[in-house]
Image: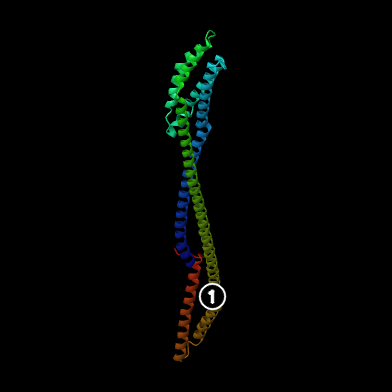
Amino acid sequence: MAAQEHLRRVIPHGRLTRGLLLALFMGAALFGVIATSKLENRVQQIQTAEQSNPLWIASQLHFEFLRLEKDIAEFSLGYTSADDLMLRFDIAWSQINVLQEGHMPRVLESFGISDAVVTELETTFQRLEPAIQSLRTNDLTIEARRDRAEEILRALEGFDLSLREFLLAMSHEKSREMSNFRTDLLSLSRMISYISATILSLLAIFIFFLLLEIRAARDAEDEMRVLAEEASSAARMKMNFMSVVSHELRTPLTSILGGLALLKHRLGTIEDKTALKLLDTATRNGDRLLVLVNDILDAQALSEGKVSVT
């Protein structure tokens, strides 16, 4: 009974503790998954920006634009052919197209930078294309070459400064984005470290309480084993007592009652009433004692299931 009472007292507390620890463990794991997912999204954004590399593409556009202006100036002096100038013009235009396609518009939008200078430069290139195509004619004089080159350069005037400002803004936004990414990465890494420590702590506490329960269960098992041994010993003592009652008490009592009955029968003719009264008293008390012994033996037989009451 004591072991059962101990188990009834320990098991509910153990279940409550395990449930609480399991809830905390699942909450920490869920929070870790959310933090890891957020970190992965931020890394994906940075990877997309790095793969597109808008700053490098914009730098290439500015570089090709400067080379285009240089080739136009050299063409006016006769140092560059019209075909080379047209090739340089096409390369610069291709850089404009790269900035306006793929991931670049989304990256520029995420940076909060306007691509108006790129759009305006594309419009200017579209307007200048016929003029540059006309430079391929062979009947141009030196003066005509110079005038057309100067006209094209005047149309491109101001874009150098605009592209520099565009590059500066993009460089600033990219630096800010990388700084924010590093800050977020540091914060998330700390958060993941705290979550990992929390999960390990909860796991250690769970194992600690589990060991306590195992120890309590072993103590209860040992106590129940002791009680079982005591019960077995009591049963053996009971069986020994029944054996004593059956063999050491009932058999002699039966013999005594038989002797008293025989003695009473032989002395029935005497007139000593005191002796007869003593014989009657001994016989009556012997019968009562025999009935008591028989009742004890019958109760034992009933408890063992050897007889049934109908």
**Number of numbered discs overlaid on the protein picture:** 1
Q: Name the residue furthest top.
A: 139
Q: Quadrant of residue 158?
A: top left
Give whichever of 160, 122 is nearer the camera: 160
Say whether residue 37 is visible: no
Neighbours of disc 1 within 10 Å: few (<14), some (14-19), many (20+): few
Residue drawn 48% across and 73% down?
296
277 horizontally vs 223: left or right: left
To which residue does mark 1 refer? 241
Give whichever of 51, 310 is nearer the camera: 51
Q: Name the residue furthest front.
A: 143
Residue 268: percent from the left, percent from the top? 48, 87
Say whether residue 77 is visible: yes
Residue drawn 45% across and 25% down?
159
Residue 215: percent from the left, percent from the top? 54, 63
Residue 225: percent from the left, percent from the top? 55, 66
Quadrant assignment for the C terminus: bottom left
Q: How is the image coloured?
A: rainbow
Residue 81: percent from the left, percent from the top? 56, 15
Residue drawn 54% across and 75% down?
241
Give whichever of 247, 287 is nearer the camera: 247
Q: Secondary structure at mark 1?
A: helix
Reply above or below: 170 against 239.
above
Q: Mark 1: which amino acid?
A: Phe
Give whichever of 147, 209 is nearer the camera: 147
Reply above or below: 136 against 284.
above
